[in-house]
Amino acid sequence: MGPGFKASPLSIAVPEGAFNKWVNEEVTRRSRNTPGGEGPGTSRRGFQWPKLNALTINDLTSQGREWVDFLGFKSGLQHSYGLTGDTLEIRKRIDDNASRYIVNYMRTTLVLVSCLLCERPDSLIGIIVILAILDWFSQFSDRTRLDKQSKRYQVLSVLVTLTVWIIVFLSKAMASISRSLLLVGLVVLLHASFRLPEDVERRKLKMHKRQQRIKR
C-alpha cells in the first residue's frame, strides 16, 4: 500500500496495519515536501538549529507548555511519537522540540538533578558549601573593592580555589553532578528525538480522525 493511496469509502476494507504504514509514509513525505523544508539551516551537512537560535529571554521565562502536551497524552501517544532513521529529520525534531519545550526541559532537568543529588547527601552539602564560599568571596571583593591585580586578591583567590577543589574531592560533588547531567541529557535527547514536530503531529491526528469518520 504505497503513498499514492487516497481515502475513499473503499478504505474501510484496508487492514489496520497497512493503513498505519501508509499514514506514516504520507506524513513523512508531506513533511519533506513542505515549502522551505530544505531552506537555510536545514541542509544535512550544515544544520544551523534555526528555532533554537531564535529563542529569546521571554521564551526561557515563559510558563512553558502543558505537561499533558509535553508527554504526548493530549493527542495520544501513537500520534505524538514516531521512529525515524534519517539523521536530518532527527536534528529537525530536536530543534523543534527543544525550542517548543525549552521551559519544560529546564524544569525536568532541575527536578531530576535534585532527586539524583538527594541520593548523595554529602555531594549535595558539598555543592551548597561551594556556592556559599563563592558567593562570600564575590561579595567580599565587591564590598572591599579589592583590585584584581593586587597580591591580596590573588592570595584569596588561590585559597578559595584550593578550598573548593578540596570540598569537591571530599564530597565527590563533581562526579554526582556529571552523572546527573549525563542521565538528564540522555532523557531530554530521547524525548526530543522521538517526539514528533507539532505540524507532523497535527497532520497525523487529522488523518486518523478522517479514517475514523470513514469507518463510521
Image: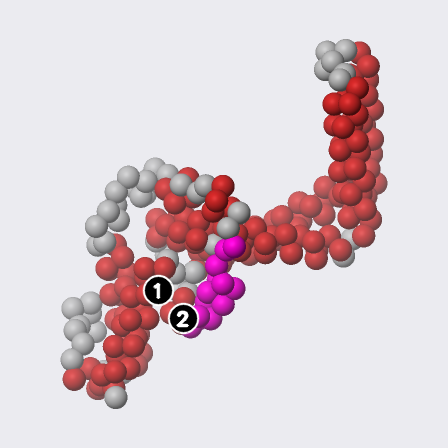
> In this view of the protein, can residue 157 be seen by the observer?
no
Pick the front one: 180 or 201 = 201
Q: Please name the residue shown 74% across and 27% down the image.
A: 138
Circle on res. 201: 1
Which is more N-terminal, label 2 or label 1?
2
Residue 215, compared with residue 26, is above or below; it is below
Tell whether 145 sits left or right of 197: right
Q: Are marks 1 and 2 in contact (CB under 8 Å)?
A: yes
Identified by mark 2, the residue type is: Ser
For the record, the magenta segment spans 63-77
Q: Please name the residue shown 29% across and 66% down the image.
A: 203
Q: Quadrant of the C terminus?
A: bottom left
Q: Please name the residue shown 57% across and 51% down the image.
A: 106
Tell whether 167 sits left or right of 53: right
Residue where numbered disc 2 is placed? 75
> In this view of the protein, can residue 12 be seen by the observer?
yes
As measured in the structure, the alpha-carbon distance from the residue carrying label 1 to the one carrying label 2 is 8 Å
Quarter of the view holding residue 204: bottom left
Which percent across, then down, holds residue 179?
67, 49
Tell whether 141 sits left or right of 185: right
Residue 123, compared with residue 18, is above or below; it is above
Q: Please name the residue shown 40% across and 51% down the image.
A: 96
